[in-house]
Image: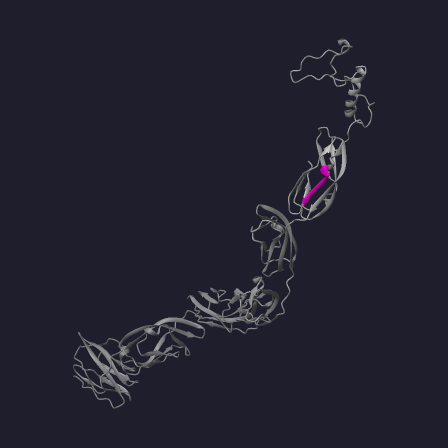
Amino acid sequence: MSNRRSGRFLLGAALVATLGGAAFGALPVYASASSHQAADYPPPPPPDPYGPYTPPGPEPTDDATPGSEDPLAFDPSSLQVTGTVGTRVTASLTVTGSYGLTVTYTVLDRSKLPPGVTIGADGRITGTPTAPGTFTVPVKACAGTECAQGSIIFTVKPSPWTLTVTFTGVAGQPSSGTIRVNGLSTYGSRPTYTVTEPGKLPPGITVTADGRIVGTPTKPGTYTFPVKVCSGGTCTTLSVTLTVGQPVAPDWTVNITFDGALGRPVKGQITVTGTPYGARPTFTVTDPGKLPPGITVGPDGRITGTPVKAGTYTFTVRICSGTTCMETEVTITVAGQSTTLSLVVDGFNGTVDKPATGQITATGAPYGTTVTYTVTDPGKLPPGITISTDGRITGTPTKAGTYVVPVKVCLGSGCAATTITLTVGSSTQMLIVLTGFSGYVGQQVTGRYILETAPGATFTVLDATKLPPGITIGADGRLSGVPKVKGSFTFPVRVCLGTACGDTTLTITILASAPTYGTVTTTEVTVTICSCGDTNLALPTQFGTGFTVVDPSNLPPGISVSSGGLITGHATVPGTYMVLIKVGNETWKTTFVVGAGEPEPAPYVY
């Protein structure tokens, strides 16, 4: 027995012994009796300003009788607890023999508690039972160093309300169901349903306030969660269990057609058979990043685009028909391609110390693809010339010669090595000569441009709109057509000798229509010229008068006029030619007619 309790019992015994067995045990220790003197008791202490004075008793001893005080024990009534499923429980454990000390309570085996119920260290029993039955729960109570054990008999009655749950759920498919409460005592009341722990619902599923179960579950499994049902001010919490099944793959057949090659538009189609009649299937690629670059799959299953990288690609397609869906893996292969390219160097006009341009062009590349060019040995280029990756040739060459340049040509990831040849000509200028020219309005033009001392040159008119209307110039320099307008016309032309080219301008003068073949009358004389032989004629002259042809190029080819008025030479091209000749202060309009007959002597002026 502890000193605390022994002291209390010894105090009573000391009172009896001190008073000689008289029945004064209930008196305070400082009370007096007629048979005793005041000196037998210690004097009372002075008043305590902080409270009433309690005189000390005799010193406790350890010779008290064991068992003379009630031990710490559970109140039996607190060990009997009843509850109802779905209804909150509020109760408390109590003990006797604690004598004012703080009591703490411990559940020795929490697995024995009714589901939904807890017991705190202060002995309070709280919670909402979720399952009926009788539960025996071992507990321990401690006050100071004294402890006692007991068992709670917890009886949970079934709820007067029950739930009827209907639900059909398959992962990945829209699902539905209802929760309905039975046993309502309030007629006409409309119950409400609240999931108190939404995190326990199947992912993707919700329960509405009227008990409808809606959504598309995303994960198969069995899920149990609490639902609080209220009707007419009365509420209870019941458990609901839903099972989400694994999706069953429909009995569909998927077919794929695909023909794809690098850099070319593809044709392909994903189809499915066995779907419900009238339900058009849809196709969705779940991870578009796994498609071949440049390729897409439409909702109708069509595969379109132009692949930019060869290889084999596997991706997942989700196929849905109505509310039924399935996923399948699709594998397609984009073939590489063997492409033959032909390189052409277009328009390179390399001449020393003159800006040069040109372009490398590849023929045979698939539509929409890009060809790149890389000079693998820049030292082989003509000095001063560069070639960009798009094939442009630019620069000002500084040294004549023929240069074989190694070039790497790439189409996508495929590359091939080849060479191109560039020729840089010297800066020596060559004369362009127009031979046999005759140009009059309304008459067939004649003549040909040639490059002096360099036969085989080609001519390209760079702006045909600047030619005399009705006239064309062929690549060999020949003029053709019938002029429509008189005048002088200057036009740009490119002249090429091999790969060396140069640009310049040329001028043609078209004269007005010639008069009818016969004699031409000047103010003084009529002259005819024959192409049948040499001409030796004289214009009418006066003593000391000189003749100057304003534009000798307008004379008939092969004919010349001296300052003394002599017409000499051998006319080579029949036709009519108008020539302006200055005679002193006058300008004569003279027309030469070259015919095939005998020349008529001109009058000679003495």
Vertical placement of residue 250 versus 562, above or below: above
Relative depth, front residue between 254 and 400: 254
Q: State which quarter of the image contains the C terminus.
A: bottom left
Relative depth, front residue between 375 and 245: 245
**165 horizontally vs 3: left or right:** left
List x then y, in percent, for residue 1.
80, 27
Quadrant of residue 577 within the rendered picture: bottom left
Vertical placement of residue 591 versus 326, above or below: below
Model colouring:
one colour
Quadrant of residue 206 within the rendered picture: bottom right
Residue found 64% across the figure and 64% down from its top: 248
Relative depth, front residue between 324 and 117: 117
Residue 114 visible in image: no
List x then y, in percent, for residue 259.
57, 73
Residue found 55% across the figure and 73% down from its top: 339
List x then y, in percent, for residue 257.
58, 73
> In this figure, what is the number of numbered marks?
0
Residue farthest toward the bottom in the current orientation of the protein: 598
Quadrant of residue 223 within the rendered picture: bottom right
List x then y, in percent, for residue 182.
62, 53
Residue 330 visible in image: yes
Vertical placement of residue 414 versus 480, above or below: above
Q: Is residue 164 magenta?
A: no
Write the start and end of the magenta stretch as one range: 77-83
